[in-house]
């Protein structure tokens, strides 16, 4: 406590409280920037093992950092980008016909749902998109620009990783340097493992869902698989939400098809929870399902979809810091 500024704040609690409020308001004001930096940090952490592998092969640092990004860019431009028009047309068709499917499924289950309202909502949204093409174009380009910015930030974080780490460590007293290094290494390992594992799970679940629904002869197998892969990033809740539209579509084929689809999703979840998650995600996350659900709910309430997606890595980060202080107090 040799710092006079810290001593002043501790003695003047009112000033200290106002200072904390100002910091909280400032954080809320720049939350978008902080979220982007956090995502960039997660991507950086995910790429660290690849960079270390390439450097062991005597490849220069800048090339070792560039290779993973070039690989991702090549993957998207060669495989994903050509399929985007087909994805979009399939999803649009599903949205247009979904109210009728929902109405039919509700009749089979004996549930009253005003499908016309659902159809009106979807039609109005599609109409708004058509009438406000400039706003949509701005959002698309804004999203692309944000994504590119995050990737560029993550690239430079990875390129200057050691230097940034040393700078961060030097902010703390010398006796705490080893502890800070250990905590940052644990955070990077945890967040990087979570991101890599999540990508593997999303690709696996999306691919298997597409193959399974196609073999069952279900309409819109591709967009339903895309939904399953995307929602996989939300643990526990995501797979349940992904199964609902598939079951509704299946009910419009036959009750037997719907039962088979339900069994398929249950089987897929059993394989994921008992084989994939313990091998891929348990070490990376290691959170109780209740903690995951509460974290996702709080994250979605505070920051919407992005909050739900980032809840797990953020909780993992807080737990590492809390556990380190808890061990120190003992």
Image: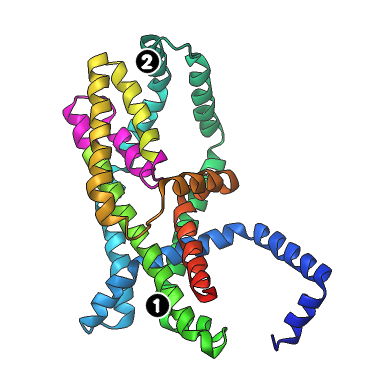
Spot occupied by residue 196 in the image (x, y as percentages of width and height)? 32, 59
- Given residues 284 and 43, the one toward you in this image is 284
Residue receiving disc 1? 159
Secondary structure, mark 1, is helix
Q: Are marks 1 and 2 in contact (CB under 8 Å)?
A: no
In the picture, the quarter occupied by the N terminus is bottom right
**300 in the magenta segment:** no
Q: Is residue 77 visible?
A: no
Q: Which of the 4 image quadrants contains residue 313?
A: bottom left
Q: Residue at x 57, y 42 (%)?
A: 135
**211 in the magenta segment:** yes
Q: Which residues are magenta?
A: 209-237
Say few, some or many: other residues with alpha carbon within 10 Å of mark 1 (under 14 / 14 to 19 / 20 or more).
Answer: many
Q: Residue at x 52, y 27 (%)?
A: 127
Residue receiving disc 2? 105
Depth check, mark 1 against mark 2: the one in front is 2
Say few, some or many: other residues with alpha carbon within 10 Å of mark 2 (under 14 / 14 to 19 / 20 or more).
Answer: many
Residue reaching furthest to the left: 215
């Amino acid at each position: 406590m040799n710092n006079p500024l810290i001593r002043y704040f501790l003695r003047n609690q009112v000033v200290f409280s106002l200072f904390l409020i100002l910091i909280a308001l400032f954080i809320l004001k720049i939350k978008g920037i902080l979220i982007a930096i956090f995502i960039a940090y997660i991507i950086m952490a995910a790429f660290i093992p690849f960079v270390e592998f390439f450097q062991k092969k005597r490849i220069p640092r800048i090339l070792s950092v560039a290779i993973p990004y070039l690989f991702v860019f090549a993957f998207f431009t060669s495989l994903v980008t050509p399929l985007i028009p087909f994805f979009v047309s399939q999803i649009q068709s599903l949205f247009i016909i979904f109210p009728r499917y929902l109405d039919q499924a509700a009749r089979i289950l004996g549930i009253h749902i005003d499908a016309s309202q659902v159809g009106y909502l979807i039609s109005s949204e599609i109409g708004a998109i058509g009438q406000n093409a400039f706003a949509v174009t701005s959002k698309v380009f804004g999203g692309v620009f944000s994504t590119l910015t995050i990737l560029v930030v993550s690239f430079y974080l990875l390129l200057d990783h050691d230097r940034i780490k040393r700078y961060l460590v030097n902010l703390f007293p010398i006796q705490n340097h080893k502890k800070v290094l250990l905590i940052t290494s644990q955070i990077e390992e945890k967040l990087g493992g979570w991101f890599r594992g999540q990508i593997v799970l999303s690709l696996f679940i999306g691919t298997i869902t597409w193959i399974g629904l196609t073999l069952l002869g279900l309409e819109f197998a591709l967009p339903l698989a895309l939904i399953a892969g995307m929602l996989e990033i939300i643990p526990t809740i995501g797979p349940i939400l992904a199964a609902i539209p598939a079951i509704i579509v299946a009910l419009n084929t036959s009750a037997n098809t719907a039962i088979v689809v339900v069994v398929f999703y249950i089987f897929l979840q059993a394989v994921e929870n008992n084989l994939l998650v313990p091998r891929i995600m348990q070490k990376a996350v290691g959170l109780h399902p209740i903690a995951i659900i509460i974290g996702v709910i709080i994250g979605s309430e505070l920051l919407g979809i992005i909050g739900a997606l980032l809840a797990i890595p953020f909780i993992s980060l807080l737990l590492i810091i809390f556990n380190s202080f808890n061990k120190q107090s003992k």
